[in-house]
Amino acid sequence: MANRSCIIRLSRYKNALNRLKGLNFVRVFSDNLADAAGVTAAQVRKDFSLFGITGNRRGGYKVEELADQLNRILGKNQLHEFIVIGVGNIGRALLHYPGFERSGIDVAAGFDIDPAKYNPQSQPPVLPLEQLGELIKTRDIKLAILAVPDYAAQQVLELVLSAGIKGVLNFAPICLKAPPGCIVNNINLETEIENLIYFINAAENRK
Ligand code: NAD
């Protein structure tokens, strides 16, 4: 069974592959992908072997074929609809980010508790929380992004899970736990920045 780090590497290989495709590469070698993803060629081969992807020592991998395989594994061969809860700074930016469309991600709607944010006519619409359950059900939506304040995050998590959401990306700076059968990925920007600061300081101190 692949772990989260392995799937993150597959996304990086897929992005590198798309760049190489744009440069008209027909074949790639694990070294090419390893360089682009910052790992060893052996790691690339190990990750691919988990999914039965085999290359050829002399000829490498066919770019088109490998791109199809990675897209299928990562679910990129179909459109995925998200909802965004909390249409403030982060939520608004996500709602209108044009790059998602290219990646097969479609934001179906935003939801907020503040009536001043409602805009059912906008694209995507911003709706009251009371309409969340129905939209999830009728469109069979499985994914949600939480961009609410930390004090509201647990309650909003319970709301979306009870409405049928299975995967949550949480931007609130608290670590939310998922019950069995659901996945919550916590993105804590402060932690990531602290991490950067620590390693930059550590590198400077070694000089
Ligand atoms: P924001 O205050 O601009 O927006 C939060 C939105 O959530 C508001 O529109 C509010 O009405 C709505 N909301 C509050 N309670 C709700 C509820 N129960 N149900 C539905 N909507 C509700 O906040 P932001 O800057 O967009 O940040 C969102 C989250 O991301 C916060 O937890 C914040 O700590 C975190 N974060 C933000 C940044 C940033 O740069 N903006 C950086 C790091 C972390």
Image: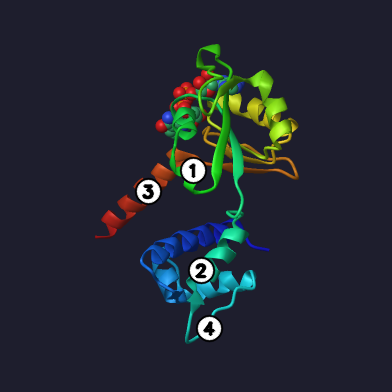
Which residue is rendered at x = 38% and y = 63% of the image?
A: 22
Q: Earlier in the sequence, mark 1 or mark 3?
A: 1
User: Would you name the residue on which mark 1 appears?
Assistant: 100
User: Would you name the residue on which mark 2 appears?
Assistant: 64
Q: Earlier in the sequence, mark 2 or mark 3?
A: 2
**Crowd rating for badge 3 (residues with CA inside 10 Å; few <14, some 14–19, many 20+):** few
Q: What residue type is labelled 4?
A: Asn
User: Would you name the residue on which mark 3 appears?
Assistant: 196
Q: Earlier in the sequence, mark 3 or mark 4?
A: 4
Badge 2 marks a residue whose secondary structure is: helix
> Which one is nearer the viewer's eye here, 127 or 129?
127
Which residue is rendered at x = 45% and y = 68% of the image?
A: 39
Q: Position of residue 135 (x, y in %)?
A: 68, 28
Q: Earlier in the sequence, mark 1 or mark 2?
A: 2
> Which one is nearer the viewer's eye here, 103 or 114?
103
109 up-or-down from 143: above or below: above
User: Would you name the residue on which mark 4 appears?
Assistant: 56
198 up-or-down from 164: above or below: below
